[in-house]
Amino acid sequence: MIAPQKSINYQQYEFQKWKSFEAETIVETPVSLTVNGEVWITFMCTPISLEALAVGFLYNEGLIENMDEVSDVRVCEHGDNIDVWLNRTVEQPTSWRRTSGCTGGVTAVDLLAKPNVNFGENRFKIQPDAICGLVELLFESQSLYKETGGVHTSALSDGEKIVISAEDIGRHNTLDKIAGLCLMQDIKPEVRILITTGRISSEMLQKAARMNAPILISRTSPSSLSIEMAERYGITLIGYARKHRFNVYSNSHRVES
């Protein structure tokens, strides 16, 4: 198997002097997804929780609904391919569109189509201090980031604690891993809040909607399309969240004033 981090040596220039250092850096590697014996796509990812990445990707793409449809999922001995066997035939999408993901994510979902979800009737509300607290919990859960840097973290919360978290060099991969872990471990919190270190683009918003999360929180910015989609879906979109502040871009009624 491939390790998620690698030892490196580097030279640092500071105050007109050079120094040599040893450190750990995050691994980015191609891992292919094979479904029912047919190679579909190649993820550029950090090689941890790969089974969850594959299952969550298929779920977020709308190709499976639960683990009852999955006969087997396993990573090959070399760690460069994930085999998923479904108990039914499934057609590979005819066109994969490259997303704005930093490591070249792909999706076949029509992000401009009319959404088949709407959280407008969801009456859950959250206190501002709770939002700031969840961001702090997200930072505390960044175990791989603390060792290497250069990696995104996303987490699913029930409004009080972190239920599950995932790390990857690709921010979109973190949400697929969370979706996969939830399916594989039968995690079904009644309240679902997603928190991420990554920028919120349209595919990140789509994945949050697919995962039934009416609140999506990021430490950085949303794109214009993600804000438009959040309004249509009824999702409360929060950005630039820190210990003492955040911005609300859509459906602010869920945040107590």
Image (spheres, rainbow, N blue to C red):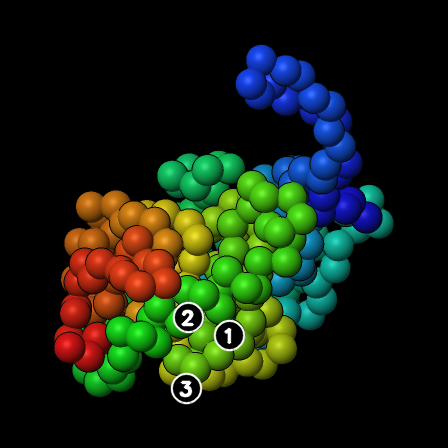
What amino acid type is highlighted by mark number 2?
Leu
Q: Are marks 2 and 3 in contact (CB under 8 Å)?
A: no
Characterize the local packing of mark 2: few (<14), some (14-19) or many (20 or more) Cα atoms within 10 angstroms.
Answer: many
Q: Are marks 2 and 1 in contact (CB under 8 Å)?
A: yes
Label 3 or label 1, whichever lies nearer to me, is: 1
Q: Are marks 3 and 1 in contact (CB under 8 Å)?
A: no
Which secondary structure, mark 3? loop
Who is closer to the viewer here, 19 or 127? 19
With 40 as the anchor, is 19 left or right in this view? right
Which residue in the structure is indicated by mark 2? 134
The label on residue 125 is: none
Which residue in the structure is indicated by mark 1? 162
Label 2 or label 3, whichever lies nearer to me, is: 2
Q: CA distance from mark 3 to mark 1?
A: 13 Å
Q: Is residue 58 visible?
A: no
Which secondary structure, mark 2? helix
Q: Position of residue 87 (x, y in %)?
A: 64, 69
